[in-house]
Amino acid sequence: MSGPNWMRSADERILRQLQEGRPDYLALVANRLGMHLRYVERRCAVLVEHGLVEPVSGEVVYRTTERGERFLAGEADLETDTADAATSD
């Protein structure tokens, strides 16, 4: 799947990991993917900014949004579908 120029290959892996289960702590996501926690935290901040994931508690637990689900299903073009990204889901 090809994403916009801001997207990194790790982003899709993070999205898929969050999609597979219930909301999760980033430390567990990082461990499962074999990535450094700080990198996963930075990439999740970008994914939040683009409306693909959202924190679900004050403990920084994330899940994919409807927009993130549409991207993974190949139904969202993140380059052109940017209007109100953070508030549309």
Image (cartoon, rainbow, N blue to C red):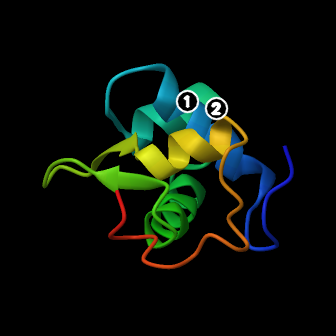
Disc 2 marks which residue? 33
Give the vertical position of 52 relative to 32 (above or below): below
Inspect this view and state whether residue 86 appears: yes
Residue 35 visible from this viewpoint: no
Q: In this rendering, would 76 be left or right of 57?
A: right
Amino acid on which disc 1 is placed = Gln
- Element type at marker 2? helix
Q: Residue at x 13, y 55 (%)?
A: 58
The disc labelled 2 sits on which kind of residue?
A: Leu
Q: Are marks 1 and 2 in contact (CB under 8 Å)?
A: yes
View extreme (left): residue: 58
Tell me what residue is drawn at x 71 percent, y 60 percent.
77
| Quadrant position of residue 46 | bottom right
The residue at the far top in this view is 21
**Quadrant assignment, res 86:** bottom left
Q: Secondary structure at mark 1?
A: helix
Please name whichever residue, 19 or 88, is drawn nearer the observer in this view of the structure: 88
Residue under numbered circle 1: 17
Quadrant location, the N terminus: top right
Coordinates of residue 56 in the picture (x, y in percent) = 21, 47
Q: Which residue is situated farthest in the bottom direction here?
A: 83
